[in-house]
Amino acid sequence: MKMRFFNAKIWDGEKLFDGELRVEGDKIARVSPVSTLEWQHWDREIDCGGNLIMPSFKNGHTHSPMAFLRSYAEDLPLQEWLSEKVFPAEALLTDEDCYHLTRLACAEYFAGGTTFVCEMYGHTRAVAKALADSGVAAVVTEGILDFDGSPKFIEDKIDDSVEYYKNFPARVRYGISIHAQYTCGEGTLGAVKRAVDKYKMPLFAHVSETAREVASCKEQTGKTPFEYLAGKGLFDFGGAAFHCVHVTSAEMEIMAQKGVAAVTCPSSNLKLASGIAPLAEMKKRGVKIGIGTDGAASNNALDMFRETYLAAVLQKCSTGDAAAMGAEFVLGAATRASAYGAEGMDALAPGSSADFVLIDLHAPNMQPGNDIVNDVVYAAGKHNVMMTVAGGKVVFENGKADVGTDYDALAERCRAIAKRIADERARA
Ligand SMILES: [Zn+2]
């Protein structure tokens, strides 16, 4: 497919200019500040009407199938929420459930301008297939924990996954992850460390989401969670740590030195009363920052506009410094995938993956246009997304997301899954 998007304002990830963008296949062929008149055959020519083209959102932490738990269990602190509500409901999920629930999440991602996710969930292969079938780019990870089996079983499982995902489209890659320090004993961590070394791969993990997690890790190991995991060499090839609400300055130093990204999920942290991640301090110490939604069970929206806004404003409030975190910085953090090891998706440039969004600059909430980047972070919402392009394919347009299957039937199927599980839980 050859497409031309002309008469646009373009924010390419660094600078803003008027111009046009051309797509050939799944890549950006050209981004130019002027619209040149040359004859070519286009499969589609889109007059952007002076609206904004910018890189799509890259959701740095999510559990896509958790869409079935949206607004299911509220007003509980994290540990009770997990052990009494989430885990027992998740135990009733099948591979097929996870496949459909992930496709539903993909429709929500596209509608909100997101085209990449860093995913962690069980039933991982069904989830990965759903992401691939829907056209979302992803790093998919399993969230390994003791419950998976013996260290030998875990090592074999990772070997098997590395092989398995070689047959996937290039947009969906495999990543090694552990659920968290508190769900992985010495044996499990040893197995994961051997795999990380063998494949020289980054590691993904939930880290220091709650104060209680940090206190119990210190009690058990004498160390804070990231210090403990990094001390075992688990982050020797980089990776990403999800949440990082309660990280110490010493941990920030190690994160910066090992190139480990801190991925903040502000809505989830606020809603579960976990706290506010010290992003401004991490940024100051040279830690890479990413932004994610976490799952729909704890957020409850898979909406990167909201997370990006909160990532900026919470820092201003928690530090008492209105300049602690600016719009351009957070928008960069929300639109880059390289923090998760996915290259060629960060900026809009020739040769990059064609993943971008068209934002309505004519809407009342985007007037008068004093500063477009500030407008996107502080004033815009997903209702301003006019079009989403993922891997060179238009996947959201005229208010409808295209995940390659009939949406109404998909939504109905997902409601039936949620109802089946709620009924089973009520009987238990
Ligand atoms: Zn999570």
Image: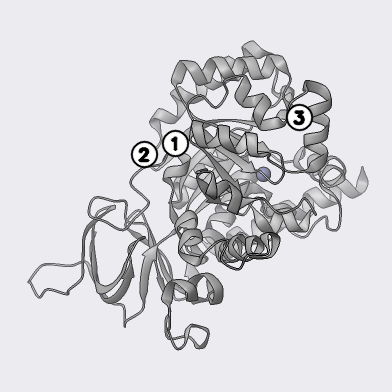
* Foreground tag (2 vs 3): 3
Where does residue 381 sit, x and y in percent of width and height? Answer: 55, 73
Tell me the crowding category of disc 2: few under 14, some 14 to 19, or many 20 or more residues within 10 angstroms, Cα based: few
Label 1 sits on a secondary structure element that is: strand
* Residue 35 falls left or right of residue 193: left
| Residue at image mark 3 | 182
- The amino acid marked with disc number 2 is Ala
Where does residue 205 sit, x and y in percent of width and height? Answer: 62, 35
Q: Does residue 183 sit above or below 17 in this rendering?
A: above
Q: Does residue 45 appear anywhere in the picture?
A: no
Q: Does residue 278 appear anywhere in the picture?
A: yes
CB within 8 Å, label 1 to label 2: yes
Q: Does residue 103 sit above or below 171 in this rendering?
A: below
Label 2 sits on a secondary structure element that is: loop
Tell me the crowding category of disc 1: few under 14, some 14 to 19, or many 20 or more residues within 10 angstroms, Cα based: many
* Foreground tag (1 vs 3): 3
- The amino acid marked with disc number 1 is Arg
| Residue at image mark 1 | 173
| Residue at image mark 2 | 170
Closer to us: 64 or 424? 64
Give the alpha-carbon distance from disc 2 to disc 3, as whole Å.
33 Å
Q: Does residue 176 sit above or below 359 in this rendering?
A: above
